[in-house]
Amino acid sequence: MKKLNTSAFRYDEKRPFSTSETPTLIDPFYTSEADQSRQLDELADRMDQAQNRMHADEHYGLLVVFQAMDAAGKDSSIRRVFKGVNPSRFKMAPFKKPDDSDLKHDFLWRFWQELPERGNIGIFNRSYYEEVLVLRVHPERLQEQYIPKNLLPSNKKTLWNQRFGDIVHFEDYLFRNGFPIVKFYLHVNKEEQGKRLIARLEDTEKQWKLSKSDLEEREFWPEYLQAYEDTVNATATKQNPWYVIPSDDRTNQQLIIAHILTEILESLPAHFPETDEKEAQKLIRQIKKQDGK
């Protein structure tokens, strides 16, 4: 079994990303389900310890962004990878199609509302990247956004480049304020996705998760892949990189994500506050006195 090197999945301007040349399935980093579970539990303990330091330090927060096609494994990865994280310091925000209130604000507005506090981990299940993915595939939906017509470039390429710039500036701003961002694109093969969608339809408890419109979106698979490729290449930076995760094997997917997050959390220069041993002993004596000891 080969060693997991997280840099193999990282995109930070140093190399271009190609959806066609990037595998959706690679050799596993586990030997069995029991081995995978053991590794994930060990990584969860390390993540918990690192998060405790971050929470006590109160200078850093972490935003984790998940983007993918349907059935790529976003929900299952979030559930399993963050299983050991203190829920009081963890917040997950799922984003669906914007409602009318969202559309009456700028395209980043509703995402500002869900950013994590210092010391906490925030998860975006889909994100502001939908604004350069779904809208790239369906540009007619821009008409729903109340943007003044005189401010909409006639050339759509110009518009997407503007939004890429807005997103990069937004993420740089957060980074400079102590909120690094980890962005995951879960890269799944269309045939594998089809198998998972059929499995949903064959499970009465999961049929509700799939609609006719979801299947209609599959018709735009090539357009979405191009949108993802362009988006990763335009917004991957050293401070806020993208990680492209081969996702045909969900077990492997979860291990890779857990390793990346553990390394990033442990790399943050967060520390427990210095303690005063004399003051601690004084408080211990006070407690014992309160208890009549």
Image (cartoon, rainbow, N blue to C red):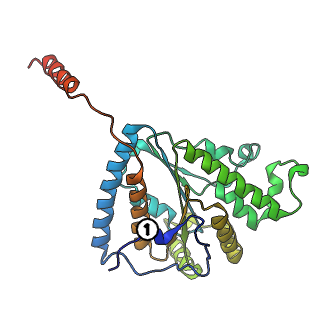
Vertical order, 119 against 5 (above or below): above
Residue 264, by quadrant, is: bottom left
Q: Is residue 279 left or right of residue 48?
A: left
**Element marked by disc 1:** helix
Q: Quadrant of residue 270?
A: top left
Nearer-the-camera pick, 207 or 83: 83
Q: Residue at x 41, y 81 (%)?
A: 27
- At x 45% / y 39%, what residue is drawn? 59
Pick out the residue farthest to the left. 293
Please state the horizontal and vertical placement of residue 104, each as a whole percent of the image. 77, 43
**Few, some or many residues within 10 Å of mark 1 (<14, 14–19, 20+):** some
Q: Position of residue 44 (x, y in %)?
A: 33, 57
Q: Total of numbered circles in the picture?
A: 1
Name the spot of residue 152 as percent of width and height, x first. 86, 54
The residue most toward the right is 150
What quarter of the picture does the N terminus occupy?
bottom left
Give the quarter of the figure containing the C terminus: top left
For the residue marked with disc 1, what is the amino acid? Thr
From the image, tell me which residue sits under label 1: 6
Q: Position of residue 60 (x, y in %)?
A: 46, 43
User: Residue at 45% across / 43% down in the picture?
Assistant: 120
Q: Is residue 206 above or below residue 21?
A: above
State whether residue 194 is above or below residue 150.
Answer: below
Q: Residue at x 30, y 33 (%)?
A: 274
Q: Is 164 left or right of 190, judged from the image as shown?
A: right
